[in-house]
Image (tube, rainbow, N blue to C red):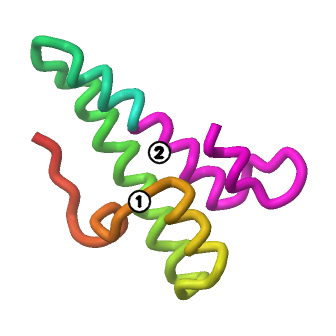
Amino acid sequence: ANTQKVERAGPDTGSSEVQIAILTAKIKTLADFLESRGRPDKINKRNLTILVHKRQKLLQYLRRKERGGPRWQHLIQTLGLTEGTWKGEISLR
């Protein structure tokens, strides 16, 4: 859904913006699944951590490349991401 809002031209699957949008959708789905589960799920918690760090790396790359330009601003507003998603270490409990 959000991937279409950040596509650059035509069927776009390789741009950083689309990759970040796809990872964000996967993260939300997996986080919702883990919250709905009543017991600890170590494997999926690890998978969630891996996805979060992949997205964090892509966000840091795009921010460095764009330096707060229009592509960066559009992505952050469209996906509703905060500064905490690309800065600092992320810990999941």
CA–CA distance in space, label 1 to label 2: 9 Å
Q: Is residue 63 magenta?
A: no
According to the picture, the residue beneath numbered tag 2 turns out to be: 24
Q: Position of residue 75 (x, y in %)?
A: 57, 63
Badge 1 density bin: few <14, some 14–19, many ≥20, Cα 10 Å: few
Please indicate whether residue 86 sits to the left or right of residue 70 in the image.
left
Q: Position of residue 92 (x, y in %)?
A: 16, 44
Disc 1 or 2, which lies upstream in sequence?
2
Q: Residue at 63% across / 59% down in the picture?
A: 17
Q: Which residues are magenta?
A: 1-27
Instruction: Say if 88 sits above or below 31 in the image.
Output: below
Amino acid marked by disc 2 = Thr
| CB under 8 Å between discs 1 and 2 | yes
Q: Which is closer to the viewer, label 1 or label 2?
A: 1
According to the picture, the residue beneath numbered tag 1 turns out to be: 81
Secondary structure of the residue carrying tag 1 is loop
* Residue 64 badge: none
Please indicate whether residue 12 sits to the left or right of residue 90 in the image.
right
